[in-house]
Image: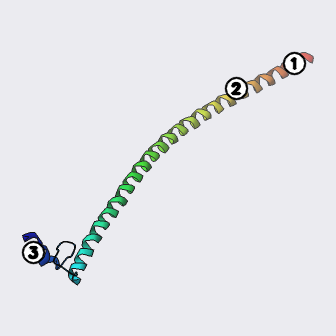
Amino acid sequence: MILELMVQAIWGCLPELASGCIDMTNSSSTYFSIAIGAVIGSVISWWVYNRQKKTSKVQDRTLQKLELLDERHEKLLNRIQQIEQHHQNTLDAILKLEKNLAETIKKDRD
């Protein structure tokens, strides 16, 4: 009873809360709409925050995977470069050997 009187004093006549009311006053309607809007706004804000937090976590994991992949890629490129250098050295040695053999054969013919 006291709670009902306090609510009516603050909010005015609310037919939803008090059985003796016939119609809502403008002020109580405004306050009730503000309260409902605040609840709905809070729920939507929480939902947006929660979705952004989940998206941020997924993006962080993806970024970490990309960084790891980039490191592996760099190591692989360095290894390929070393292999290329080794192949070039081997090719140069083969060509030099071929040239020496050609010169030796040419000298033997003369």
Q: Nearer the viewer, mark 2 or mark 1?
A: 2
How did the renderer colour the structure?
A: rainbow
Residue 51 place in picture, x, y as percent: 39, 56
Q: Which mark is residue 105?
A: 1
Q: Which mark is residue 90?
A: 2
- Residue at left 87%, top 18%? 105
Query: What secondary structure is found at the residue carrying circle 3?
Result: helix
CA gap, disc 3 and disc 1: 121 Å
Q: Count all numbered tags in the image, as a single digit.
A: 3
Residue 44 place in picture, x, y as percent: 34, 63
Residue 28 place in picture, x, y as percent: 21, 79
Bin the neighbour count of mark 3 within 10 Å (Cα to Cα): few under 14, some 14-19, many 20 and up: few
Question: In front here: 22 or 89?
Answer: 22
Residue 14 falls in image quadrant: bottom left
Q: Which mark is residue 15?
A: none
The amino acid marked with disc number 2 is Thr
CA gap, disc 2 and disc 1: 22 Å
The amino acid marked with disc number 3 is Leu
Asked if residue 75 lies left or right of residue 40, the reply is right
Query: What secondary structure is found at the residue carrying circle 1?
Result: helix
Residue 110 place in picture, x, y as percent: 92, 18
Q: Which residue is mark 3?
A: 5
- Residue at left 37%, top 53%? 53
Residue 56 vs 13, above or below: the answer is: above
